[in-house]
Amino acid sequence: MNLEDLEEALVEILGEDFEIVTDEEGQLVVWTGLKEDEDGELVDYLSDEDVEEDMEIDPDREVLEEDED
């Protein structure tokens, strides 16, 4: 098997939504953009940055301050 064979096999499984990179030691790493949820299903991975962008945050909201006793 060569890299092209691996890419073709992954395209059949994942479609085009993956990336193959090489780490410092030359090992191939496949980035899928997926993660396993609590039910063991593969779902889209959303980074913390993506989640923050997707959240609707009201910039005018008031923050409740804690009473200092």
Image (cartoon, grey):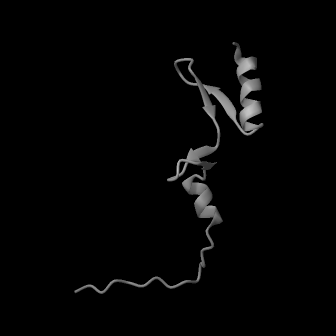
Nearer to me, 40 or 49: 40
Horizontal and vertical percent position of residue 40:
53, 47
Horizontal and vertical percent position of residue 67:
30, 87
Picture quarter with the N terminus: top right
Does residue 62 sit above or below 33 in this rendering?
Answer: below
Nearer to me, 32 or 60: 32
Picture quarter with the C terminus: bottom left
Q: Residue furthest front?
A: 39
Does residue 1 sit above or below 53 in this rendering?
Answer: above
User: Residue 65's image quarter?
Assistant: bottom left
Q: Is residue 18 left or right of residue 61?
A: right
Q: Residue furthest top?
A: 1
Q: Residue at x 70, y 21 (%)?
A: 6
Q: Residue at x 57, y 46 (%)?
A: 35
Q: Residue at x 73, y 40 (%)?
A: 17
Q: Is residue 49 left or right of residue 64?
A: right
Horizontal and vertical percent position of residue 66:
33, 83
